[in-house]
Amino acid sequence: MAALAAPTTGTTKEKLATYLVIDTGPIVSSAASPSYYLSSADRIFTTPAVIAEIKDEASRSRWETIWKPFVEVRSPKPNSLKVVAEFAKKTGDYRVLSATDMGLIALGYELELEVAGGDWRLREAPGKECKGPKPEGWGWEGKIVGEAPKKEEEKKKDEEPKEEEKSSAAVEEVAEQLEATTLETTPVESPSTEEAATAYEDHQQPEGMVETTDEPTEEVAESNEDSEDDDSDGWITPSNLHRHMHPTPKASTAAVVEKLTVAIATVDFAMQNTLLQMNLHLLSPTSLIRIKNVRSTVLRCHACFFVIKHPTATSHFCPRCGSGDTLRRVGCSTDANGVFKLHLKKNFQHNVRGNVFAIPKPVAGTCSMKGVPDAPVLREDQKEYTRAVKWESYRKEKDLMDQDYLPNILSGTRRRGSAIRVGAGRGKNPNQVGRKRK
Ligand SMILES: [Zn+2]
């Protein structure tokens, strides 16, 4: 298998990741091909559970013919599974992660240990700092990147102190200039320089640093190096044509700043959330672009502020306080630092209408009973609720291909929409200000 990776490593283009772990998606999809993935990673991995998931004939044959020679199938060790399971329990994703998902994360974790030489890059628990400093004498970039860029690195190592001084001097200059011109931007400047310094230490790539810093510093750094290019910025002239023709170091490294140790390509949100919080790298399976921020929505109880991270079709009640009708959909995101954030609206006011009068009584004599149902569902353990959930699950099981299936208009079924209604129901609020008749 290593021999397969050999011809691809010879290319001059820097690959995004050393190892890539893929999900079922790419194999099942007819659009994806192994060569596309091998253009971004040296080796591709997956777990036996993923292969077992491929059931249909077409996908099976695609796996056998196209994918099998290029993908290494490996099952994770029980110990890595245990570590991942422990972590997923802490992030709250354990319940929704399937055994296959868990296996993929565990494989990613295991490969990370091999490539990075330990778990120093990973987090022990969500929101914590990474475990430790890079072990001494273990620069995985130098080991993995290959022969051709090594020379450049050696050169960079020689130039490193000078450039560092130069860049820090440039940054200081910018800070001074900014202090002189605007006072507002100066506090932003100091952390960015720190970041740049750390990024510089990590990658040993000055271009990477430019990428992380703010635009003003970049401009000044350029002007310090070559003042001629200042005026010709943005224009293609005979003097800078070669730079536009060939990918310049700046342009290429802006896209690929650091070579990732191990990347996992998945679209599953629970997996993405766990991966980012563990600090494992995440790629989009379609575009193979690194995902640094995952967005989704959660349900949040506005009575007790409990957050349901993985809402299901039947999450109608708060698991902590038991309130019905207090769950609100809230946007959330997980960033590359593993920080889970809720995006709450500023000055959001909850609708408190309907809290004054009692729930209205049902109006007899109509099919829909106008008003509210006989026994409105207010708590999760009511028999009306359990019955409604059962009915809902039956409704979903209806198969459209079933020959005995009749559409509602023929069968006479009058129930429409969701059968589960918590509280008085929408539009049944007795305190609501109705539309006035003219
Ligand atoms: Zn609650």
Image (spheres, helix red, strand yellow):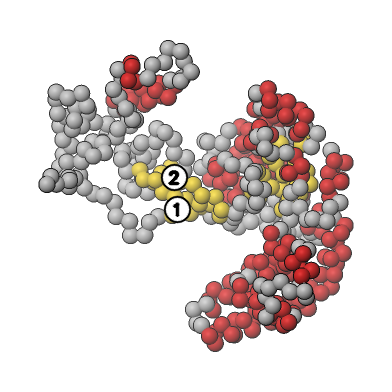
Q: Residue furthest front?
A: 238
The foreground one among 12 and 31 is 31
Task: Decide if ligand 1 comes within 8 Å of the CB at mark 1.
Answer: no
Going by the numbered disc 1, the residue's amino acid type is Leu
Specify whether residue 193 is in view: yes
Instruction: State the image quarter where residue 326 is shown.
Output: top left
Quadrant for the N terminus in the image:
top right
* Residue at 56% over, 53% down: 293
Q: Which residue is drawn at the image coordinates 71% and 48% (left, top)?
A: 262
How many other residues sit within 10 Å of disc 2, few (<14), some (14-19) or many (≥20)? some
Q: Position of residue 178 (x, y in %)?
A: 56, 82
Q: Quadrant of residue 188?
A: bottom right
- Residue 298, label in figure: 2
Tag 2 secondary structure: strand
Other-residue count near label 1 (Cα within 10 Å), few / some / many at <14 / 14–19 / ≥20:
some
- Per the image, label 1 sits on a secondary structure element best described as strand
Q: In the image, what residue type sits under mark 2?
A: Val
At which x and y percent is residue 350?
A: 29, 51
Task: Tell me where residue 161 appears, x and y as whole percent.
Answer: 78, 76
* Residue at screen point 32% across, 27% down: 416
How far across and down, in percent of the image, does residue 13 sit? 79, 55
What separation in Å lies between label 2 and label 1 (alpha carbons)? 9 Å
Q: How many marks?
A: 2
280 or 369: nearer the eye? 369
Side of 226 relative to 7 (left or right): left
**Labelled pair 2, 1 in contact (Cβ < 8 Å):** yes
The residue that disc 1 covers is: 342
Q: Tell me the tag on residue 354.
A: none
* Mark toward the start of the polypeptide (2 vs 1): 2
